[in-house]
Image (cartoon, rainbow, N blue to C red):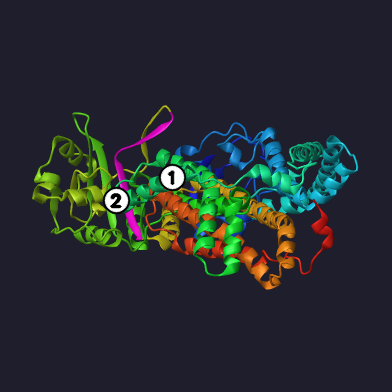
Amino acid sequence: MSISQMPFENRLLLRIDVDPLDGELPLPPGLDRWPAPGEVLLSPAAMDLLDEDPAFRAYVPGTAVGTVGEAGLRGPDELVAYRGVRSDDQPRGGLAATDASNGAMDLDTAPPSAGQIAALTLLMAGLVGLPVVAFLVVAARLSAAARRSRWTVLRFLGAPEKLVRRINGVENVVLAAVGWVAALAVYPVVNTWSAGSHVLGTTWFAKDTALTPALAGISGIVVLTLAVLAGARTSLPVGATRAAARQHEGAPRRASWRLLPLATGIVSLGGQVLAGVAREPGSMPVKLDLVMSGAILVTAVGLIIALPELVRWTGVFVARRSTNLAARIGGARAAFEPRASSGLVIGLALLVMAVGVTIGQTRDARAVSEPAADYVPVSVSVSELPDGARAQLRKSVAAPVLVLVAGDGATGSTATIAVATCGSVEEMLRTITSAQRLDCEPGETLTPGGRIDAATAAVLDSSAFAALDLASLATGALPDEVASFLVEGGVSALITVDPQPVLDSVRYGPTTETDGSTLYSEDALMVLTVPRAEVTATLASIYRVAPYSQPSAVGLDPASGQNIAMIDGFIQLGLILATAMTALALATALADRSVGRLRPDHELLIMGMPLAMIRRAHRWEVASTLVSGTAVALVAGIFGGLAWQYAGGLVRTPDWSATAMLVAASTGAAALLTCTSSVGVPREIDSELLRTP
C-alpha cells in the first residue's frame, strides 16, 4: 500500500494505492470491495472533479468503478481515491498495511473523539440560540423604558419591589422559553445548511451533529438561566420618578482622558502600517505580530471607553455651531446624556472595527495557502522522475527550467548550484521581479565574488555534473541580488548551460533507507516557473510522468488552507451573528430612546413646535451620536486590517474593494438609522402621558 497526499488547486487529495491480491487485507469502512489493478474507487467529490476537470484525471489514473461511502469519509467534500496497483509497480513494493478498520483519512491522522463531535454540536446549538440571548439582554433595557409607567403604577398600588422584579423575571423566562423552542425547531435546518455550505470553512455530514435530547436540555437550561439573570440584573428606577432620577445624574462632565487609550491604539496601528509601507519589495516581513495584536485590543477597549466623550464632543459642536434649530436641539440632547447615547453606537462601532480588521486578516491568510504571485515556481525532486520523464516533462510544460543541486562540502558547509540557460534565468527574473537583471553568456560558471569555494567545488565533483565539461566553462561574477533571488539564502554558483545533461545524470529512486527515511543519490530539484493559473496543470503534468512524486508550488498548501478556512469560517459566522445581534440591539435601543423622548416631545408639541421640526431634531440627535463613533471605528478597523497584513507581510496590496464595501455599508447603516429614528415621534398630544410622574 502506498499513500500519497496530493494538492489539487486549494484542496488536498488522499490517494491510497493498494494491491489487495498481496495477502489478506480487511476492507475499510465505505468500501464493499478493493479495486482491482487499473481500477479506482473515488469519493463523491472526487468523482465530480473527474467529470469537471480533465487535469484531475492525472491524479487518479485508472477506470472509475465506484464510490466511497459516507462511512469511509469525514465530510462530503473530501477528495479520497483508492487505486488498484500491483505491489511491483509501487515504490519499494508499497507499505505494509496492518489495520484498515478506519476510513481513508484515518490512515495518517487520529479519528475525532466523541467529545469533539459533542462539543461541535453544542457549539452549533449555542450559535442558534445566541441571538435569543442577545435579544433578552437588549429587551431588558427596552422594558426598562417602555414599561416604566406600568411599573410605577404597580408600586403605587403597593406591590413590593421584589414582586415587581419577579414579574419582570417571569416575562423574561417566558420569552426565553419561546425563543428556545423556536431555536430547537429551526436547528435541523440550520445544521443541514451549515454542514454543507462551507460557512465554517469546511463541510461535514449533518447527521454527525444532529441535536440529541441531552444537548437540547443543556441548551435550554443555559438559555433559561441567562434569562433569569438578565431579569434579575435589570436596572429599573422602581418607585422613583423620572424627575428624581434626573436629579442624581447631574450635568455631564468633560473626560478627555477617555480618548487616550483610543489614540494610543490608533497611533500604534498607523505606525505599523507606515513600517510596512516603507519595507522594500521582496524583503522579509515586519515581525510585529504581538505588537499588532496588542494594538488592536487596546484600540477596541479604547473605542468603548472613548465613545461617550466622542458623542459629547460631537453633540456640543452641532449644538453650538449649527444655525438650524432642530440640529441644535438634537446635538444638545446627544451631548446631555453621552453615556446613554453611546449605547446606540457601541455595537455598530465594534462591528465595523472587527470587519475592518478581518479584511486584512483574511486577505493575508489566503496567501498562506494559495499562491499570491502572478508567476509561481513549481519544483519536484529529480530523483522522483523516472528515466525519460525529465525530458518529456520539459516538452509538456512550456516554462523556464532551473535545476538546483545541493550538497555538503568536506568541512560540513553546504552549497547549492543552479543550472539554467541565460534565457531561462532572464525570463524568471522578468516574470517574477522587474528589479533584477542578469547579463550573462552561455557556457559560464558565475559565482558570488567570482571565486569557487571548497563546498561548491565538492558539489561540482558529484555525479550530477559528470556529463558537463566544467573545465571548458568561462568564469564570472554573479550579482548577490540574483543569487539571493534564485534561492533563499543565495546560490553558490550559476552554470549557464542547458540543464538536461544534469537532469539525466541524477539517478532515479532512493539509494539508502535509514530509520524509515529515504535518501537519494543527489539532492536535486527541477524548478518550473509557470503562471499562477497553470499551477494545477503543471502539477498534473508531473503526476502523469511520475505518479509517486511529491511536487510542490510556492504558496500552495492545502492542508494549512483547510485549517485557515475553518478559522475564517468561524470568524465569518461570528460576524454574521454579531451583525444580527447588532441589528437587534440597534432596533431595541432606538425603541428605548423613542420611549424616553415621549414626554419631552409632548412638551415641545404643547409649546407649539411643528411636528416636522421635532422629527428633524430626532434625526440630528441620532446622526450626532453615530457619525463620530462610526467614523473612528472605520479608521481603526482599516488601520487594524492593514497592520495585520504588514505583520504577516505576505500580501502588501490592500483589499480596497472590500474596504470600500465596508465604508458603504457603514454609511448606509448610519443613514438608515438616522432616517428611521423619528418613527416613534408622537403625532398628537397625549394628556395621560403628561400626568405620568
Is 627 situated left or right of 159 in this image? left
Task: Please say whether residue 445 is one of the residues in the magenta stretch.
Answer: no
Please name whichever residue, 567 or 659, is drawn nearer the observer in this view of the structure.
Answer: 659
Q: Is residue 508 above or below residue 394?
A: above
Residue 265's tag is: 1
What residue type is disc 2 on? Arg
Check contact, mark 2 vs mark 1: CB within 8 A.
Answer: no
Q: Which callout, 2 or 1, points to the residue nearer the camera?
A: 1
What residue type is disc 1 on? Gly
Q: Is residue 682 above or below residue 491?
A: below
Task: Please say whether residue 520 is one of the residues in the magenta stretch.
Answer: yes
Residue found at the far top of this picture = 515
Other residues around mark 1 within 10 Å, as few (<14) / some (14–19) / many (≥20): many
Other residues around mark 2 within 10 Å, as few (<14) / some (14–19) / many (≥20): some
Residue at position x 77%, y 69% from top? 683
Question: Could you tell me which secondary element the residue under label 1 belongs to?
Answer: helix
Is 505 situated left or right of 43 in this image? left
Q: Position of residue 237 (x, y in %)?
A: 75, 42
**Measured Cα–Cα span from mark 2 to mark 1:** 22 Å
Q: Which residue is mark 2?
A: 279
Question: Could you tell me which secondary element the residue under label 2 belongs to?
Answer: loop
Q: Position of residue 511 (x, y in %)?
A: 35, 35
Is 413 situated left or right of 69 in this image? left
Badge 2 or badge 1: first in the primary sequence: 1
Please name whichever residue, 399 or 612, is drawn nearer the observer in this view of the structure.
Answer: 612
> Is residue 122 something that shows in the picture?
yes
> Is residue 282 something that shows in the picture?
no
Tell me which corner region of the image, top left, top right, bottom left or bottom right, holds residue 1.
top right
Q: Which residues are magenta?
A: 516-530
Q: What secondary structure characterizes most of the magenta part?
A: strand
Residue at position x 67%, y 67% from top? 614
